[in-house]
Image: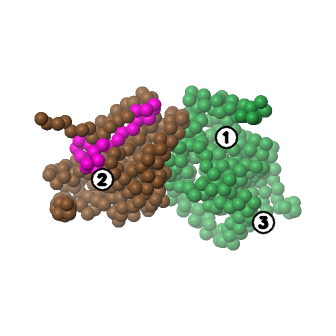
Chain colours: A green, B brown
Amino acid sequence: MGSLQGDYLASMADLVRLYFADGRATISLARPAVRNAISLEMIVALRGAIEEVSERAAKSPGDARLLVLEGEGACFCAGMDLKAVAHDPVAMGGMLRELSHALLELRRLSIPTIASVQGAAIGGGCGLVIVCDLAVTHPEAKLGYPEVDLGICPAVVAPWLVRKIGAGPARAMLLMGGTMSGAEAFARGLTTRCVARERLNATVDEIAAGVIGGGPTAFACTKRFLNDLDGSLDERVAAEAAELSARVMAGSEAQARIAQHLAASEGHKDPRHASR
Amino acid sequence: MNKASPPCITREIVGSILTITLARPETRNALSTEMFDALEGAVALAQQAAQRGEIHVVVIAAAGSAFCAGFDLSEAVASPRALGGFVIRLGGLIAALRSLDAIVVARVQGAALAGGCALVASCDIVCASEQASFGYPTHRIGISPAVSLPTLVASAGAGAARLLAISGEIVDARRALALGLVHQIAPDGDALVRLVGAVTDDLASKGPCALRETKRWLNRVDGTGGDGALSTQSQAATKASADLCDSEESRALLADFWALRKDAR
C-alpha cells in the first residue's frame, strides 16, 4: 500500500513527479519556478516517468487506466529552456532528440492520455499537449508555436500538429508563429475542451471517469489503430525532425534572435525597465 | 495599328514581399496560354529572388471581381489539344508554388474555381474576403480535378477534398474556412487587403531561414514536397487529368457546355 493519496514516486530530483491514484497515473512537470521550462534533465525524467507508467499499465492495469499530464504552479509548460542550451549546439541537439523521443513514447502508451493545461503551453510545451489524446484548457491560457519568431524551426512538433489539426491548418499555424488564447486554441482543434480555469480539474476528472468506465482493451485497440493510421510511430520522421531543428537552431539567424530574446526577457525582469 | 495587349500579371516588390497580381479581369483572370506564360515566368523569377535572399513572402492576388475562373475554355474549344497542355502546366505551377523558397499567401477576393481553386490550394496561407468562392466544377466538362488533389487533400483533409472534388459544389469563404481550405477571412475587399498586409508584414518579421526550413519540412511531412510519395502521386494525377482531356467524353461535354454558355449570353 502506498500513502493515503496512493503511490507517490519522486523521480530525478523532483523535476517530474509521478503519482498513481484512483486508477489513474499523473505525471506532473515540477519546475514551477521556471514555468516548467523543458531542460534536458527534465525530459530525461519525463521519459523515465512515461516508461514507469507504461510498465505499470502492462503489469497492473487497474492502477493506470489513463495518464494525466499536468504542470505544477501557474503554467503547464513555458517551452524549451533556451537559456541553458542556446550557445551549445551539442546540448541543444541532445535536448531536441530527447524531446522527440519523449513525444513518441507518450503517444505509444496504450492508455488514453489527457493534458491538463493551465496558464501557458508554448513551443515544445504545446507539443506535449497535442501529442496527448485529449487536452483541456481555459480561455485565458496562452498556447502556440512562436518558434519561427525566434528563427527556430518547429520541426519536432510539426508532424504531431499535422496529425492533430490537418496539414493545411498546421502549415498556416506554424508559418505564422506567435501564440493564441486557450479559447482560440480550442476553436482551432488543439484541445478537446475549453472550460473556466476553476473547472479545469473537475473537467479532467469527468473525462477520467468516462475513460475508467470504458473497456481498457478497447481503448488500447483504438489507440493502436489511430497510431497506425496517422503514422504516429514513424521513428524516422521523429529522428529527422530533431536533427533539422538542431541544425536550424545552431545557425546564425536563430542564434542572433535567441540572444536578442533572452536579453529582452532579462531586461524585462530588471526593475528599472518595469515601467516600460 | 496593333495595340500590344496589356500584361496578364503585374509584379510589385515592397521590402521582402513580392505581390503577383493576375490582371485580366475581363476574362475573370482565366488561365490562358498567355496567363500561364506570365505566371510561370513570375514564379521562376520569384524563386531566383528567394534564393538570393531578396524576398521571403509571395502574395498571389487578382484584379477585378473574380480571383481566377479556371482554364480559358475559349482556347480549349478552338484547339482540343490545348486543354491537356493546360493541365500539365497547372501541375507544374502547383509544384513550383509548393517548392518556392518563400511563403506563398493567396489573397482571394472573388471566385476561385477549378484551376483557380487549384492555385489557391497550393499556397501556404490562404486569406479570403467574404465575397470569395471556391470549387471544382470540372466534371461537367469531362475534366478531373485530379491534378489539384494532392495539395487539396493535404490542405483541407481527405474528407473535404472528396466532397469538393466529387460534388463540384461551389462553397463560400466561410464554408471554405470551416473545411480548412481558407485560413483567415475578411468582410470585404478593402479589409482583405489590410488583412493580407498585416499577415505578410508579420511573416516578413520572422526568421527567413526558419520559415524556409519549416516550409520544406512541412512539404516533406505532408508529402507534397519534391521527392515525397505524394509528389509521385502528383505527377500521376497530372497525367491522369491531362489524358482525360484528349477523350471523346471531354470533347463532347466541353462542346455542349460552350454552346450552352454562348446561348446564355
Which residue occupies the foreground of this view, A232 or B6?
A: B6
| In this picture, residue A261 sits left or right of residue B76 | right
Q: CA distance from mark 1 to mark 3?
A: 32 Å
* Residue B217 appearing in the image: no
Q: Numbered disc 3: what chain?
A: A
Give coordinates of residue B174: x percent, y percent: 46, 59
In the image, is residue B161 part of the stretch drawn in magenta?
Answer: no
Which type of secondary structure does the marked residue at label 2 adopt? loop
Give neighbour class at mark 1: few <14, some 14-19, many 20+ (Cα, 10 Å): many
Residue tagged 1: A80
Q: Numbered disc 2: what chain?
A: B
Q: Numbered disc 1: what chain?
A: A
Q: Quadrant of the N terminus of chain A?
A: bottom right
Give neighbour class at mark 2: few <14, some 14-19, many 20+ (Cα, 10 Å): many
- What's the amino acid at mark 1? Met
Which type of secondary structure does the marked residue at label 1 adopt? loop
Residue at 63% of width from left, 32% of height from top? A258
* Residue B129 appearing in the image: yes
| In this picture, residue B90 sits left or right of residue B128 | left
Residue B69: assigned label: 2
Q: Read off the magenta span.
A: B13-37
Q: CA distance from mark 3 to mark 2?
A: 61 Å
